[in-house]
Image (cartoon, rainbow, N blue to C red):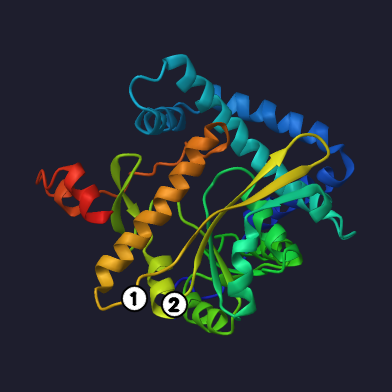
Amino acid sequence: MSAEARPRVPRLSHYLFLALYRAGCALARLVPAGVLMGAARGIGGALYRLDRRHRRIAERNLRLALGSATRPEEIRRLVRASFVYLAETGAELLLLPRIVGRDGTFLERCTVEGFEALEAHRRAGRGILFVTGHVGSFEVIGAAAHFLGFPLHAVARTFKNPLLDREVRRTRERWGQRILPRRGGLRALIAVLRRGECAGFLLDQNERKRPIFLPVFGRLAACDRSVAALARRLDLPVAVVYCLREGPGWRYRTVLEEVLLPETGEEVDGADRRLSRRIQAALERIALRHPDRYLWLHDRYRTRPPHERTGDAGEPLAAAAHRGA
């Protein structure tokens, strides 16, 4: 039995962290939501000043995405906004039961754009692969999809703290999501998709296991190939979506950016590469449209292509981008 498959025995630190998490959830139920979000913004600002390492990562990522001509003060403004955004996302997760509620009014506060493009696929009983990135209110997307009639299954790594893992899983499943363990989850996910159900993926982070290297903001990055492979294998559409909090009163806008269809034919690797590149391009567009609400702090380029690790200069990026387009 693998280390991940073996049930973890909770330690004292696990119980202490669970108590802190529950205390935070209780506080979120008692404190006015505006006060909690204000505190989160203060915490984000403090982290911006203290966390030099992630500040440098965010600055590098933004210079790459926006271009070297971008003014330094604009880079600093967006880096600080990214730290604040991260803290607000944490508060939003704690507030999710209040935001979504059980009174059926969530969709009354949520503007929905573009989802009519999925109606034909739903009527045909086809599964749909939903893809998003760490932009806007990505934790709310699972609830929004549920209320729109697209309940999601998601494959996720388990937390090292088994008590916290169980607690967060219950919170997400309360709003229609079903979380599958990363190990062995792919087989279960394929069965779900063949039944005509939907799956959700976050695809804008560094992929360490069997990545496909594609240009992201002009530099090769290790990307996840699984969605493209599933789409081709099962002939399923890929829906690139995002969700933004807008204005007072906890109003949201959930947007279908693009629907991508897999290629058919025998050129498996090339088809997966081209679809993966189109997915990443759509996620890039969303991030550049809302740069103040994107997680620039993530080390997106940590895993490097083999030719860089061996010291070989390899092919120019322009050639790699053309080959992966």
Residue that label 2 marks:
235
| Residue nearer the viewer, 206 or 108 | 108
Asked if labels 1 and 2 touch by Cβ distance under 8 angstroms, the answer is yes
Q: Measured along the vertical axis of the image, is residue 89 above or below residue 255?
A: above
Tell me: 145 left or right of 198: right
Residue type at numbered disc 1 = Thr
Report the amino acid beneath label 2.
Asp
Q: What percent of the width, then of the height, locates residue 149?
A: 71, 69
The residue that mark 1 highlights is: 264
Residue 197 lies left or right of residue 217; in this view the side is: right
Crowding near the residue tagged with mark 2, few <14, some 14–19, many ≥20 C-alpha atoms within 10 Å = some
In depth, the one of 161 and 86 nearer the eye is 86
Does residue 298 lie above or below 269 as drawn? above
Measure the alpha-carbon separation of dots 2 and 1: 8 Å
**Is 137 displayed left or right of 221 in the figure?**
right
Q: Quadrant of the C terminus?
A: bottom left
The answer to which of 289 and 115 lies nearer the viewer is 115
Residue 75 x/y as whole percent: 46, 22
Residue 27 at x, y percent in the picture: 83, 43
